[in-house]
Amino acid sequence: MPLTLYVDGPRWRAHLSRTAAANPGLVPVAKGNGYGFGVGRLARRVEWLGLDYIAVGTYSEVAEVERRCSSSILVMEPWRASLAGESDNDRVVHTLGRPEDLAALGAQQGRPRVVLEALTSLRRHGFDTEGLAAARRLARGVRVEGGALHLPLGGGHAAEVERWVRGVRFDRWFVSHLAQDELATLRGRYPDIELRPRVGTALWLGDRGALSAKATVLDVHPLKRGDRSGYRQRAATRSGHLLVVAGGTAHGIALEAPAAASSARERAVSLARGGLDATGRALSPYVVDGRQRWFVEPPHMQVSMIFVPTSASLPRVGDEVGVRVRYTTTTFDRVVTS
């Protein structure tokens, strides 16, 4: 009995079509857990959309994608000889950000396809301005498909993109995290340059109303005040019911990426949450009778135990309850598309 992602198929597909139409040159990103859908399922959607490129995060994701779509596959992690090995797949486009990698890949047979990545203000991978210009000029034994710009989140990067576009000549740039209005402005200023937006979250998760996550109720047990349960044998502070529900750490339940508090309210929430955690109380993502319910204890590997008070309407074994998850960190047992 699983943790399930339900997808309103017509609504989701309509959103994908609208997004592709609004983003000329779209390069869909399918990486990691596939934004909750799985990388293979997203690759099939790319084939359905008829797009010429798909971007993946790592070389380990290439095999799953190439079986399901015919697009060129742009690997966004930087190529390293020790990680990627020989390049004999002509559908794969490699990302290069160091001169030694450019030389090593250029020495291989078949003139591999590459993009040359710029070291943007994100400062993750890439050539600096002089290095990118030199790489563009001195590239040998490879087919350069364009430059690549991986930008910080939040928008406001048009000026940075413009500096790169004016500083190093490419006919095509692959860009990540550039807002639509910025793209439109830059395309108007540089009509002879092809800007290819790489988009993940806004494409696959842009219409959250088309998606819902639900967990199957596996067991229901009455609890009296003082009854102990779970691995840690914590005593119930009041009477109610213990629900065993699908979903645990193996699915990504209750796992969060660190987030920097940028406002007084966010800092207050973080402090309050930390105080609850210190006392052993944590609010679960499971919704029963319209409210998120408390964990009895931290999630197990594949199930979670939550407390439901006597005042709440109680689900039965086999029913499903809502669960509020972060799709990019959740692995579902099944995906059901209408």
Image: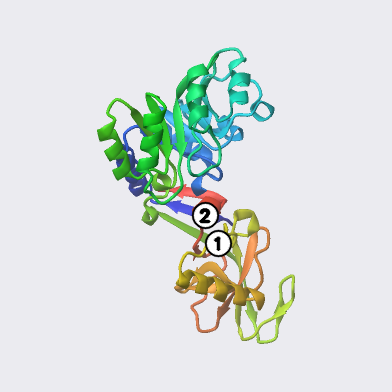
- Residue 37 point in image, percent of width and height: 50, 46
* Quadrant holding the N terminus: bottom right
Mark closest to the chain's N terminus, 1 or 2: 2
- Residue 78 point in image, percent of width and height: 58, 32
- 304 over 158 or under it: above or below: below
Question: Callout 2: helix, strand or loop?
Answer: strand
Q: How crowded is the residue under tag 1: few (<14 C-alpha within 10 Å), some, or many (20+)?
A: many
Q: How is the image coloured?
A: rainbow
Q: How crowded is the residue under tag 2: few (<14 C-alpha within 10 Å), some, or many (20+)?
A: many
Q: Which mark is residue 4?
A: 2
Residue at position x 44%, y 73% in the image? 290
Label pair 1/2, CB-CB below 8 angstroms? yes
Residue at position x 36%, y 36% in the image? 162
Residue at the front extreme, as displayed: 130
Residue 285 visible (yes or no) = yes
Nearer to the camera, 62 or 198: 198
Nearer to the camera, 266 or 159: 159
Q: Which mark is residue 216?
A: 1
Nearer to the camera, 159 or 204: 159
